[in-house]
Amino acid sequence: MRRTSIMTLALVHPENQVGVFLSNSGARPLCGRPAGSDWLLEFTALALYVDRAGLRARDTELMYTAHPQHYAINDTHLLIFTTSHIDVYEIESGDWVQTINLPNARPLDECGWIVLVYGGGSSGAFPFNTDSAPYLVYLRPLIGVGPLNLDHSCYGTNKRGNSHTRPSRHITDCKKHSMYIT
């Protein structure tokens, strides 16, 4: 068997002061993504911007509000999934965008568009109790279309085949759509 040598390269330069914090805190790397001419490196404790040499590129750091259980990253946003909520950050600016109160959620795709939400914590408080059934949530962008081609005026059908719809003029289209699905 032939051995090959693998060269490793530190993503955070040894002179970068955050590197000392990361190595002493036990933070694990999650992922890295280009952000303009810089790189956004995500760790379990924080995310930071570095240049190609691993030196700090921006003064901005993304400090998470809670320990991440899961993460997802798409073209524009970083989503940090915690036990109580999802924090959304803009990649280019590093700004916090919003918090989505979905406890115990996890992404089902790498971009975070499809999310599985399952039973809440031991308190059984709003919005989910401990014996609630899991369900899927589609997080779509407000501006533009998301990756799924869905008719958002249809909610689905009940056991009798009647469609649940928002009040709109597309009710007949929803019924036709439901008939094609069943």
Image (spheres, rainbow, N blue to C red):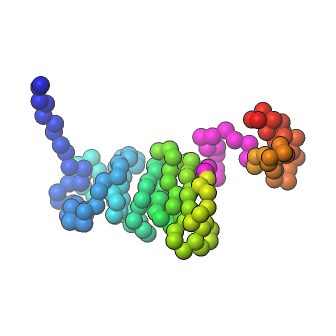
Q: Position of residue 66 (x, y in %)?
A: 42, 68
Left/right placement of residue 72 relative to residue 136 reads left
**Residue 55 makes an appearance in the image:** yes
Q: Where is 154 relative to 69, above or below?
A: above
Instruction: Report the residue that reaches farthest toward the top.
Output: 1
Residue at image point 80% right, 46% down = 159
Residue 166 is inside the magenta segment: no
Left/right placement of residue 70 relative to residue 112 reads left
Q: Where is 78 relative to 180, above or below?
A: below
Q: Bounds of the magenta span?
A: 136-154
Residue at image point 78% right, 33% down = 180
The N terminus: image quadrant: top left
**Front position in the image: 71 or 11:** 71
Q: Position of residue 127 (x, y in %)?
A: 62, 68
Residue at image point 64% right, 43% down = 145
Residue 149 is inside the magenta segment: yes
The C terminus: image quadrant: top right
Q: Where is 75 relative to 177, above or below?
A: below
Q: Position of residue 72 (x, y in %)?
A: 46, 50
